[in-house]
Image: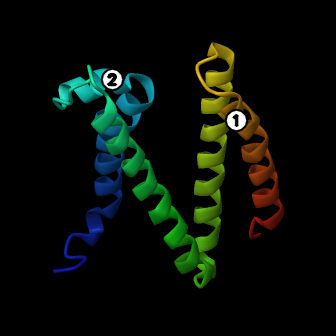
């Protein structure tokens, strides 16, 4: 059963990636409360929504962290994973700069821009050739 449609793996990744972007990634990034309303969250009292979004982000980061251990033992996969990390770091820089410009985040989040820049530079230093 595993891999029975492997010849269509590229098409699956394009469809799955597009669906993740259209239905989750971009709406959560650009209009999170509107997205929450579509999924019937009560946005008038965002407590449960905030917990859900925080947990979702926590799951995502935990999976990325766990895959770092796996990839560390698989040199052929390292370039892809490093590129993934760099894109995440660049995205975080842009997100935090946007929040700083709009003045919608606490100062600690604005200071965090430096952390993402340093992580990007350190990651580039360790990038497998």
Tag 1–tag 2 contact (CB < 8 Å): no
- Toward the viewer: 18 or 42? 42
Circle 2 packing at 10 Å, graded few (<14), some (14-19), many (20+), is: some
Question: In the rendered structure, which disc, 1 or 2, sits on the residue that comes first in sequence?
Answer: 2
Identify the disc placed on residue 108. 1
**Which residue is located at x 32 percent, y 44 percent?**
52
Q: Residue at 40% across / 58% down in the picture?
A: 59
Residue 39 position by quadrant: top left
Give the vertical position of 98 relative to 68 (above or below): above
Mark 1 falls on what kind of element?
helix
Which label was assigned to residue 26?
A: none
Q: Quadrant of the N terminus?
A: bottom left
Q: Which quarter of the image is occupied by the C terminus?
A: bottom right
* Number of marks in the rendered image: 2
Q: Secondary structure at mark 2?
A: helix
Query: In the displayed image of the protein, which residue is found farthest to the top?
Result: 102
Residue behind mark 2: 33
- Picture quadrant of residue 20: top left
- Mark 1, mark 2: which one is toward the viewer? 1
Mark 1 to mark 2 CA distance (whole Å): 23 Å
């Amino acid at each position: 059963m595993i891999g029975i449609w492997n010849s269509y793996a590229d098409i699956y990744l394009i469809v799955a990636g597009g669906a993740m972007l259209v239905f989750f990634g971009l709406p959560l990034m650009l209009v999170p409360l509107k997205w929450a309303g579509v999924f019937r969250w009560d946005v008038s009292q965002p407590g449960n929504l905030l917990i859900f979004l925080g947990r979702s982000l926590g799951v995502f980061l935990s999976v990325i962290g766990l895959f770092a251990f796996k990839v560390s033992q698989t040199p052929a996969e390292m370039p892809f994973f490093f590129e993934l990390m760099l894109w995440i770091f660049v995205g975080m820089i842009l997100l935090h700069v946007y929040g700083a410009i709009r003045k919608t985040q606490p100062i600690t989040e604005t200071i965090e821009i430096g952390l993402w820049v340093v992580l990007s530079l350190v990651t580039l230093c360790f990038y497998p050739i």
